[in-house]
Amino acid sequence: MDWEAFGKDDFVKDYRSLVRSYRGLPGKPRVILWQRLAPLFPGQTFFGSESVDGINAAIGQVAKLEGVETVDMQNPLESHGEWFPDHLHPNADGARAIAEVMAGYLKVSK
């Protein structure tokens, strides 16, 4: 997949719109983006694609432009392919690890 052909500019515009729609909800929820995304593993369609780096960079751009927090999900998960049996979605152990990363982030970033 060619990231430029995929629509980088539309991605950023649409992602910013999504962030703004969440921020506009009653109660003014806290918006936290995963940046870097959870890792992809061999066997997943986009594993090793340069487009993934482009997507991660675009998400970082959105976070900066919108002034929202980010949490890195790639580094804590990347050495645990066993938690992603289809090479993309977490099993129960992966979901637990994701919850632990988020809980740890929320505790220190009140």
Image: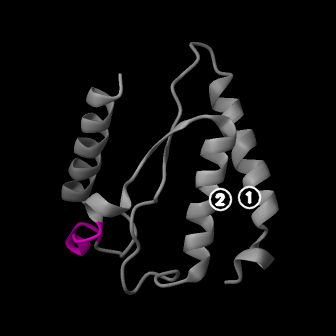
Where is residue 58 shown, x and y percent of the image?
A: 65, 59
Between tags 1 and 2, which lies in front? Answer: 2
Is 56 situated left or right of 110 in this image?
Answer: right
Is 66 situated left or right of 9 in this image?
Answer: left
Q: Is residue 8 magenta?
A: no
Please rate how many residues cluster around mark 1, counting C-alpha atoms within 10 Å: few if below 14, some from 14 to 19, many from 20.
some
The residue that label 2 is drawn on is: 58
- Total residue callouts: 2
On the question of residue 90 being in view, the answer is no
The residue that label 1 is drawn on is: 11
Residue 18 vertical placement versus 94 (above, below): above
Image quadrant in which the N terminus is located: bottom right
Where is residue 62 shown, x and y percent of the image?
A: 66, 47
Could you say which quadrant of the image residue 92 lies in? bottom left
Residue range corresponding to the magenta coloring: 78-84
> Which amino acid does the dot numbered 1 rest on?
Phe
Is 96 situated left or right of 41 in this image?
Answer: left
Residue occupying the point 35% across, 75% down:
86
Could you say which quadrant of the image residue 74 lies in? bottom left
> Which amino acid does the dot numbered 2 rest on?
Ala
Residue occupying the point 60% across, 54% down:
59
Residue occupying the point 62% across, 70% down:
54
Image quadrant in which the C terminus is located: top left
Q: Is residue 80 magenta?
A: yes
